[in-house]
Image (cartoon, rainbow, N blue to C red):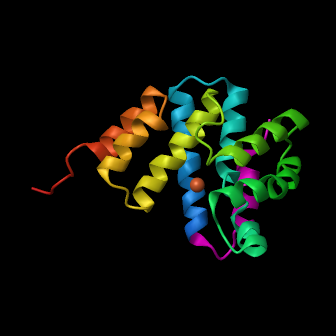
Amino acid sequence: MIDIEKLTALAIAYDAGDAKRIQHFIKVYAYSRLLGRREGLDEHTQNVLEAAAVLHDIGIHEAERKHGSSGGHWQEMEGPAVAAPMLQQCGADKRESERVQWLIAHHHTYTAGEEKDFRILLEADFLVNAYEDGMTAEQCKTAKDRVFRTETGKQYLEEMFLKPAYQAK
Ligand SMILES: [Fe+2]
């Protein structure tokens, strides 16, 4: 089992000075945790998913440093090598570490797989990005078919972005 609290502390320290990125991955972690539990993931899969959520964007700083871009492709490429020693410090065994690294390496590739942990990570990241990037209802509607698979994820997307905007009375 991976120690998620310790991993989160390491990731916050790694991203020190970049509050925006820290806020982002904490939110993706929270949605992954909620979705995984509501969707009945077993304890081990849930633990690996939560670790991947914390670390999913950990490659951004290296991507910017080496390639001058935080583009999804570079993040996917640089993330696993940054994540591996952190995972080891937090008690991940080889299989767990490999799975987290795979999830990091594909989290912008919507067609990479249909496993539930992977789809939940994509959904959680989308829910956060939709808000942070101010996506339109049309973009969210398209994503509902293209990205979302779980009932809980679709419900959250629907309630946050596809219902009429809340108006104070
Ligand atoms: Fe992200």
Q: Quadrant of ligand 1?
A: bottom right
Measured from the top left, where is residue 24 in percent x and y? Answer: 55, 59
Q: Is residue 61 in view? A: yes
Q: What residue is at 67 percent from the left and 51 percent from the top? A: 56
**Total numbered badges shown on the rendered structure:** 0
Q: Is residue 58 visible?
A: no
- Locate residue 102: give its quadrant: top right
**Residue 32 located within the stretch drawn in magenta:** no
Residue 11 drawn in magenta: yes
Relative height, residue 90 to residue 132 (above, below):
above
Q: Chief secondary structure of the magenta span?
A: helix
| Quarter of the image that includes the C terminus | bottom left
Work out which quarter of the rendered image holds the N terminus and state it: top right
Does residue 72 appear to the left or right of 137 in the view shown?
A: right
Give the percent coordinates (x, y) of residue 151. Answer: 43, 27
Looking at this view, is 18 or 105 the one in front? 105
Which residue: 89% across, 37% down?
A: 93
Residue 146 drawn at (x, y percent): 46, 36
Chain part drawn in magenta: 1-19
Q: Is residue 137 left or right of residue 33?
A: left
Residue 14 placement (x, y as % from top left):
75, 67
- Report the residue at 43% width, 41% height from top: 143
Where residue 122 sits, quadrant-wise, is top right
Q: Is residue 112 above or below residue 138?
A: above
Which residue occupies 47% across, 53% down? 128
Residue extending farthest to the left is 169
Nearest the viewer among 29 and 157 is: 157
Using the rendered view, name the quadrant where residue 163 is placed. top left
